[in-house]
Image: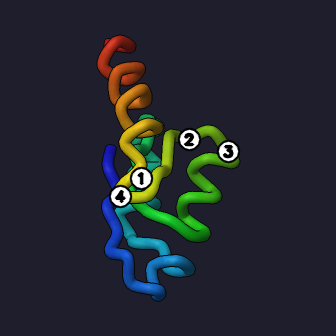
Amino acid sequence: MCVFLSCEPIFEIAFPTKFYEYLICRKQILGICKGELANIINKFGIGCAVSENDIDLLVPFIIRIKNSF
């Protein structure tokens, strides 16, 4: 499950509706975001949230998810 958010300042405090739907699915969430949404994803271990330019954190997460199937 992927959550991609714009870099606009409003998205540092706003949560998209699809985030709640992804939580119900109980799958790992890949968040390309920052702010409060990124904090929640990382703090509670429900996936990995990185900024759009942070490839060093993104690639290992994708490989780990791929290998889990």
Where is residue 48? Give x, y as percent: 50, 42
Mark 3 residue element: loop
Numbered label attached to residue 31: 1
Where is residue 59? Give x, y as percent: 35, 31
Mark 2 residue element: loop
Q: Residues within 10 Å of mark 2 (few under 14, many from 20)?
A: some
Gap in angstroms between the C-alphas marked 3 and 4: 21 Å
Q: Quadrant of residue 55?
A: top left
| CB contact under 8 Å: marks 2 and 4 | no
* x 57%, y 70%: residue: 35
The kind of residue on which mark 4 rests is: Glu
| CB contact under 8 Å: marks 3 and 2 | yes
Residue linked to disc 4: 52
Q: Residues within 10 Å of mark 3 (few under 14, many from 20)?
A: few
Mark 4 residue element: loop
Q: Quadrant of residue 8?
A: bottom left
The kind of residue on which mark 3 rests is: Phe
* x 45%, y 79%: residue: 11
Instruction: Please indicate whether residue 35 sits to the left or right of residue 65 in the image.
Output: right
Gap in angstroms between the C-alphas marked 3 and 1: 13 Å
